[in-house]
Image (tube, helix red, strand yellow):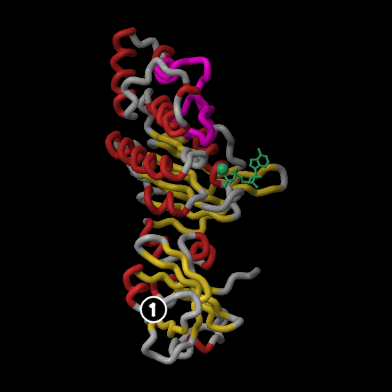
């Protein structure tokens, strides 16, 4: 573990009876980073976050925050703020009281509490909502209050467990940038759990992709998307076409090892009319800037192909069009075939 990292997780194992929820997790997080734990439901994201918060104690391993071994410290002796998916605001307290509750417990004077409250209501862009009750706010507004409440004691670490998952799509994308703005302004080290790959790609400095209690890959969004380390990551992040190794469409490609799977992103495949056709468009989905087409090659292979929308119209394509699907062989990615 590097001595300078803000948070170091070393060989953490968490068992629930016979079941291993975290299997030898090691990870370091730097001061000021925004890191996402990404993976399918049940892969251990929340368990890892709760271990960092002290809400769950590891079976073995070590967690160090700001050079202090916190592995077995109770939550109240740790330095973090946390926001959950469901708005855990006190329903019988006003927004102002929800936010300033912890400040009052610290014994701050009335003026100091008022000043802090004013500051935080402004940061979360709800300057006039102090007297409202949680039930009078939208879901997105409630999550902003929960964020202020988590941050008001200026913790060194912000933990977010699917904070946007209960919100509708438009609020969710707006709050993504709001959270990033506040996080950047404060420079606070942040870990956010999500199962939404798009959310992780758009928000994180680094993504930790998890599966079945292990880390599959750690990297920047670009690294994860462009160079997935495993077939699992390739399938989970973005869309990917998988091509059977013996398929004739791979004729021109040299596959070095037996037992590998070839994969191609939809945007790395081209469609044209000029050459001999080898596929049929069987579906297309207009997504604004791109059209996602489904191209049937044969019973073994159906490919997703993304085309810029204007290109799609220029070619006069439609369902039923015969087309030639092509690709540059250097766009092919190879993975060791996964045991089913
Ligand atoms: P995620 O947040 O990635 O959806 P969790 O960390 O909540 O996943 O859970 C990981 C696995 O551990 C799941 O299979 C879950 O059922 C199991 N698990 C979590 N908490 C407990 C618990 N308190 N007792 C038993 N099993 C648990
Ligand atoms: Mg979870």
Majority secondary structure of magenta residues: loop
- Which residue position is annotated with label 1? 270
Residue at the extreme right of the image, as rendered:
18
Q: Is residue 292 above or below residue 316?
A: above
Q: Nearer the viewer, residue 82 or 273?
A: 273
| Towards the viewer: 89 or 311 | 311
The magenta stretch spans residue 138: no
Q: Is residue 331 above or below residue 201?
A: below
- The residue tagged with tag 1: helix, strand or loop? strand
Which of the two residues, 130 or 307, is positioned nearer the viewer here? 307
**Which residue is found at the position 50% from the left and 73% from the top?**
294
- Asked whether residue 312 appears in the rendered view, the answer is yes
Total number of numbered discs in the rendering? 1
Question: Is residue 90 shown in magenta?
Answer: yes
Residues shaded magenta: 70-99
Residue 257 position within the rendered picture, expressed as x and y whole percent measured from the top left: 52, 83
Q: Residue 262, percent across and down?
A: 50, 77
Name the residue rendered at 53%, 50% in the picture. 25
Q: Is residue 99 above or below residue 67?
A: above
Expressed as whole percent of the image width and height from the top left, the position of residue 298 reads 57, 83
Q: Is any part of residue 260 visible from this angle?
A: no
Residue at x-position 29% and y-position 34%: 186
């Amino acid at each position: 573990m590097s001595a300078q990292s803000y948070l170091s997780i070393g060989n953490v194992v968490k068992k629930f009876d016979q079941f291993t929820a975290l299997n030898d997790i090691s990870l370091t997080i730097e001061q000021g980073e925004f890191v996402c734990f990404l993976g399918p439901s049940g892969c251990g994201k929340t368990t890892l976050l709760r271990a960092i918060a002290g809400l769950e104690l590891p079976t073995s391993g070590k967690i160090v925050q700001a050079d202090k071994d916190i592995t077995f410290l109770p939550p109240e002796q740790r330095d973090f703020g946390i926001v959950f998916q469901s708005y855990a605001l006190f329903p019988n307290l006003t927004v102002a009281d929800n936010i300033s509750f912890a400040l009052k417990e610290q014994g701050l004077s009335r003026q100091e509490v008022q000043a802090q409250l004013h500051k935080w209501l402004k940061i979360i862009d709800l300057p006039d909502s102090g007297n409202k009750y949680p039930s009078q706010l939208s879901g997105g507004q409630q999550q902003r209050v929960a964020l202020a409440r988590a941050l008001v004691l200026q913790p060194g670490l912000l933990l977010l467990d699917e904070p946007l998952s209960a919100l509708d799509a438009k609020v969710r994308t707006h709050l993504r940038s709001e959270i990033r703005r506040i996080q950047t302004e404060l420079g606070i080290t942040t870990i956010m759990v999500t199962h939404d790959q798009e959310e992780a790609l758009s928000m994180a400095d680094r993504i930790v992709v998890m599966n079945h209690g292990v880390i599959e890959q750690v990297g920047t969004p670009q690294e994860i998307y462009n160079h997935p380390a495993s077939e699992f990551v390739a399938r989970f992040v973005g869309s990917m076409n998988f091509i059977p190794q013996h398929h004739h469409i791979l004729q021109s490609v040299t596959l070095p090892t037996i037992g590998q799977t070839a994969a191609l992103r939809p945007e790395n495949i081209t469609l044209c009319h000029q050459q001999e056709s080898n596929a049929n468009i069987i579906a297309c989905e207009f997504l604004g800037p791109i059209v996602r087409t489904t191209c049937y090659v044969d019973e073994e292979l159906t490919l997703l192909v993304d085309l810029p929308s204007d290109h799609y119209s220029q070619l006069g394509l439609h369902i039923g069009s015969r087309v030639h699907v092509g690709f540059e062989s250097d766009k092919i990615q190879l993975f060791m075939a996964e045991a089913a």
